[in-house]
Image (spheres, grey):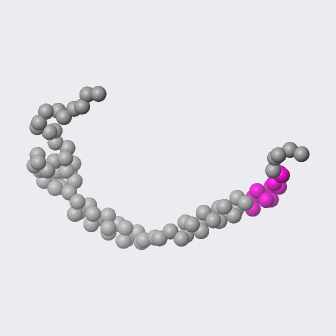
Amino acid sequence: MSGRPPKQSMSELKLRRLSEHNARLREDLARPRIRVSEASKSLINYCKSTPDHLIPSVWGPVSKAEDPFAVPNQGCQCVVM
């Protein structure tokens, strides 16, 4: 006798695949959902309240102290390894 498991029939394989697919669909169904209108409203509020320094035409010019993309004044702050 060989140590291999017995061969499954095609119908058993199909049943197993369908059962796995059904389980994935049930997991998807159980996920919490929000309406598109709520998600878009939340996204709009976030964009309006969070300044983006890369869009100065909307938020106005940014001072060097507040600009996270500005080049630092003290040396290059490079590390050579």
Whether residue 13 is situated above or below residue 33 in the rendered picture: above
Q: Residue at x 29, y 27 (%)?
A: 81
Query: Which quadrant of the structure image shows residue 71?
Result: top left
Q: Residue at x 60, y 63 (%)?
A: 24
Q: Does the segment drawn in magenta span residue 7?
A: yes
Q: Position of residue 8 (x, y in %)?
A: 81, 54
Which of the pair 7/80 is nearer the observer? 80
Q: Position of residue 48 (x, y in %)?
A: 23, 63
Q: Position of residue 60 (x, y in %)?
A: 13, 53
Q: Does the segment drawn in magenta span residue 36?
A: no
Q: Secondary structure of the magenta portion, mostly?
A: helix
| For residue 74, side relative to residue 51 (left or right) | left
Query: Which quadrant of the structure image shows residue 25?
Result: bottom right
Q: Position of residue 38 (x, y in %)?
A: 36, 71
Span shown in magenta? 6-15
Q: Residue at x 14, y 39 (%)?
A: 72
| Figure quadrant of the N terminus | top right
Q: Residue at x 70, y 58 (%)?
A: 17
Which of the pair 26/81 is nearer the observer? 81
Tag count: 0
| For residue 17, side relative to residue 60 (left or right) | right
Which of the pair 16/6 is nearer the observer? 6
Whether residue 45 is situated above or below residue 66 in the rendered picture: below
Whether residue 1 is situated above or below residue 28 in the rendered picture: above
